[in-house]
Image (cartoon, rainbow, N blue to C red):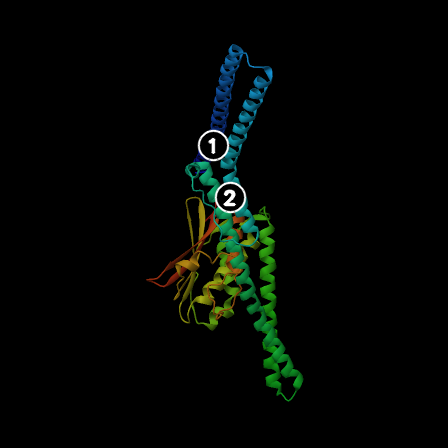
Amino acid sequence: MKAKNGFRGLTGLRREYSHRISLTLLFVGTVFLVLVAMLVVVMGLALILTNVLGIHAETGLDDVDTNSLIVVIILISLAVGIAFSFLFGRLFMKPVNTIINMMNRIASGHFETRLAFRSVMSRHPTVAELTDSINTMASELQNTEMLRSDFINNFSHEFKTPIVSIAGFAKLLRSGNLSPEEQQEYIAIIEEESKRLSDMANNVLYLSKVENQTILTDVTRFNLSEQLRKCFLLLEEKWEKKDLNLQVDLEEYYITGNEELLKQVWINLIDNAVKFAPVGHTVGVRIEHRDFCAHVSVYNTGSTISPENRDRIFQKFYQGDTSHATEGNGVGLAVVKRVAELHDGWVSVDSDPDTRTVTFTVHIPQDASGFIQ
């Protein structure tokens, strides 16, 4: 498979190289034609000058008239050359000016700007590639700006809610006139909201850490099934409150990877599954090994994900639940995606509207020596 992908990559590079060569030859050929056209004009003027000088010699005109004629023809040649240079220079600079104008608009914050050439040049593969690259950059910047706005709105809301709760109950405690039971209840709420704030801050810090990590370290072989069972136990309080049916009957599988990073992946996915599963529904996990990959799927019943949200849920700070009815700050799935990428893998999501089942699957490449059942 790697050899096949490498062959495709090499073929793609050769194709791109040939496209760039053809574009270079196109520009060189155009410049050559301009030079030929200018040469033809100059040679024509030279022939005219020769004929005129011959006529002058026969008619005996003085040297002053001849010199004046030469000067006039030279000036005409310069004018023709400048005109050709201006016209063709403007023709060649028009695409460059278009790109510069677009870049200036993007730099000014107009990320909706898109590049489009209305000429035969736009059909050339290299020009089309340039257009796609610049438009993709503008689209990514636009998405980043949208995410920044989402982050400000969602994250500020998530932080504000526990802070307001802590401040309110602290004010009640300070006012006195509370029974011991009420005091203990309010202290417990303050403690819970403080932990919620701490968890949100830790998630953001953890995301920053894995995003800045480029090399996978601390790779070991460990019991994947046991790790998943422990992650479910860590979240026992949450799934017991909702009386969920667990399906965690796993055979013993061993995997090669960073144990601590993958633990965070399973905790985030299980926590999401528990969060969005209605009371009395099912949350489970299954492990498969095929196509030289370990496929770990965490699923829950009773919910679905719309197609438009499915494309964005792995983006940082994005929350599909704009009502903030559920806890979260849009960081967990971004962490899952990044950790999977560090393991040369990927993560996918499937939402079945018929069975109302949502399944997140982490795919991690494993050869026979790295994955053992």
On the image, the x and y values in percent for residue 208 come to 60, 55
Amino acid type at mark 2 = Thr
Residue at the spot of label 2 = 98
Image quadrant of residue 360? bottom left
Q: Could you tell me which residue is drawn at 43 percent across and 69 percent down?
A: 244
Name the quadrant of the N terminus: top left
Q: Could you tell me which residue is drawn at 54 percent across and 51 percent down?
A: 106
- Check the image and name the residue furthest to the left: 354
In the image, residue 133 above or below residue 141? above
- Judging from the image, what secondary structure is the residue with disc 2 in? helix
**Nearer to us: label 1 or label 2:** 2
Q: Is residue 149 left or right of residue 289?
A: right
* Marks 1 and 2 close (CB-CB < 8 Å): no
Q: Could you tell me which residue is drawn at 50 percent across and 55 percent down?
A: 143
Q: CA distance from mark 1 to mark 2?
A: 18 Å
Q: Dot 2: few (<14), some (14–19), or many (≥20) neighbours within 10 Å? A: some
Tally of numbered tags: 2
Q: Is residue 90 visible?
A: yes
Q: Is residue 118 left or right of residue 66?
A: left
- Check the image and name the residue furthest to the top: 58
Question: Along the polypeptide, which appears first: circle 1 or circle 2?
Answer: 1
In the image, residue 237 above or below residue 57? below
Amino acid type at mark 1 = Leu
On the image, the x and y values in percent for residue 48 come to 49, 18
In the image, residue 152 above or below residue 294? below
Residue 23: assigned label: 1
Q: Dot 1: few (<14), some (14–19), or many (≥20) neighbours within 10 Å? A: some
On the image, the x and y values in percent for residue 268 come to 51, 60
Which sits in the foreground, 153 or 161?
Answer: 153
- Judging from the image, what secondary structure is the residue with disc 1 in? helix
On the image, the x and y values in percent for residue 175 come to 66, 86
